[in-house]
Amino acid sequence: MTEEIRNGYEQVDWQKHYDDNDLAWDLGEAANPFVRLWEDKVLKPGTLIVPGCGQGHEVIFFAERGFQVTGVDYTSGAVGLLRKTLKDKKLNANILHQDFFSLDVAHDRTYDNLLEQTFFCAIHPDQRPAYVETVSRILKPGGLLFGLFYETGEGGGPPFNTTEADVQNHFAAAFDIERLEKCSFSSEKRRDKEWLAVMRKK
């Protein structure tokens, strides 16, 4: 693995983004496609986990709407900001300061829903099979993955390019892909670059 690919991938590199307040990927609010899925009653209340949640705008949005939310991030910068926001807003959510891939068996078959946004593209492509395995392990049978997969059209990363074929190839064995389309209502900075997916665990 080249240094170019590794750059920005290690935990210390992500933490430096928080130390330097260099959070270019952060939208400052819950991603509009997830809001729309909730408004359309596609994404229904229940247990919800958000891997690589960052400052946790989706964690906050869905906690405010009665979901039992778990956010996972391995940077202290992200976790600290999210916990402060939850406290300020007097909201309850379970925030785990750990590597998503290290979730133990207590999480197996626990969650109704999982939100994927800028985590699949942030991990090295070599870790994508482990991602699918972990997601499949922690979702309940019939549980739903709601994903925004980022197609950069560029080499290297992060973010690492994710195509429609990448999504199909990685998830089709473990999930029924009920919806996979180029998202028409992404935020302006991500317009025409996101694949919106709804997948049900087999």
Image (cartoon, rainbow, N blue to C red):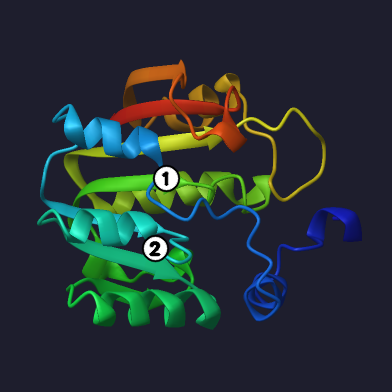
| Placement of 112 over or under 105, stated as above or below | above
Where is residue 37 shown, x and y percent of the image?
A: 25, 31
* Residue at 11% in and 51% down: 46
Whether residue 123 sits left or right of residue 71 in the image: it is: right
Dot 2 surroundings within 10 Å: few (below 14), some, or many (20 or more)? many
| Placement of 70 over or under 199, stated as above or below | below
Where is residue 200 shown, x and y percent of the image?
A: 26, 31
Mark 1 is on which residue type?
Answer: Glu
Where is residue 189 shown, x and y percent of the image?
A: 61, 37
- To which quarter of the image does residue 26 belong? bottom right
Q: Name the residue under label 1.
A: 116
* Residue at 29% in and 38% down: 35
Mark number, residue 35: none
* Residue at 28% in and 62% down: 60
Secondary structure under the numbered disc 2 in the rendered image: loop
* Residue at 47% in and 46% down: 117
* Labels 2 and 1 touching (C-beta < 8 A): no
Whether residue 118 sits left or right of residue 3 in the image: it is: left
Q: Nearer the viewer, mark 2 or mark 1?
A: 2
Secondary structure under the numbered disc 1 in the rendered image: strand
